[in-house]
Structure formats: C-alpha cells, structure tokens
Image: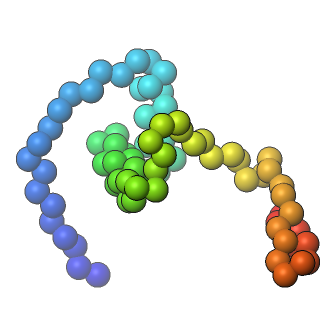
Amino acid sequence: MSQTTVTRDYSFTVRLSQDEKRLLEALSKRLKLDKSATLREVLRFASVDANALPASGRFVSVPSDSLVFPIRLNGKVVDAT
C-alpha cells in the first residue's frame, strides 16, 4: 500500500466551550485519531456531497440498538434486527 504525503500549510485557532472540548475529545477517542485529524475527518465527512446536505437543520444518528423498524420488500415484511 502506498502512502500519500499531504502538505498542510494552513492553520487556525478555534476556541471551544468545555462541552465542545469534551465532545471533540470523545469523538477523537472513538475515531482513534488526534484532535486535528478528527476535525479533518469531520470536514471530509461534511463535504462528501455538499448538495446532499440540507440547507438548514441537523441530523443526529440514533443508536442502532434502540431503533427497530420493519422493511417491506416486494410485499413481504422483513425483520430489520
């Protein structure tokens, strides 16, 4: 597997509240990335298809173990669990 070298020549400062800092640290831990890499990953995720994102509002994922719904395929109900 080849490695691509990326030159990063731009930096900025972000001031976070204690809650925002806690959220960033939790996400960094979950993704197993440092905080800078986590922010870059969030930028990549948000910019995958800018047209697919709503002009306003936000979506939050729901833990999969707390949501069950039936899926209908060709008239047959399939258990989604």
Quarter of image, res 55? top left
Which residue is at 88% across, 68% downward?
Answer: 79
Residue 50 pos. (x, y %):
38, 54
Q: Is residue 77 left or right of residue 61?
A: right
Q: Quadrant of the N terminus?
A: bottom left
In this view, the residue in front, 71 or 39, is: 71
Residue 34 pos. (x, y %):
34, 44
In this view, the residue in front, 63 or 2, is: 63
- Residue 16: tell me if it is visible: yes
Quarter of image, res 81? bottom right
Residue 51 pos. (x, y %):
40, 55
Q: Is residue 40 left or right of residue 9?
A: right
Q: Does residue 6 sit above or below 37 in this rendering? A: below
Which residue is at 44% across, 18% downward?
Answer: 18
- Residue 37: tell me if it is visible: no
Q: Does residue 61 sit above or below 7 in this rendering? A: above
Which residue is at 40% across, 50% downward?
Answer: 46
Residue 80 pos. (x, y %):
82, 66
In this view, the residue in front, 20 or 62, is: 62
Q: Is residue 75 left or right of residue 52?
A: right
Which residue is at 15% across, 61% downward?
Answer: 6
Q: Is residue 34 left or right of residue 69?
A: left
Q: Does residue 49 sit above or below 18 in this rendering? A: below
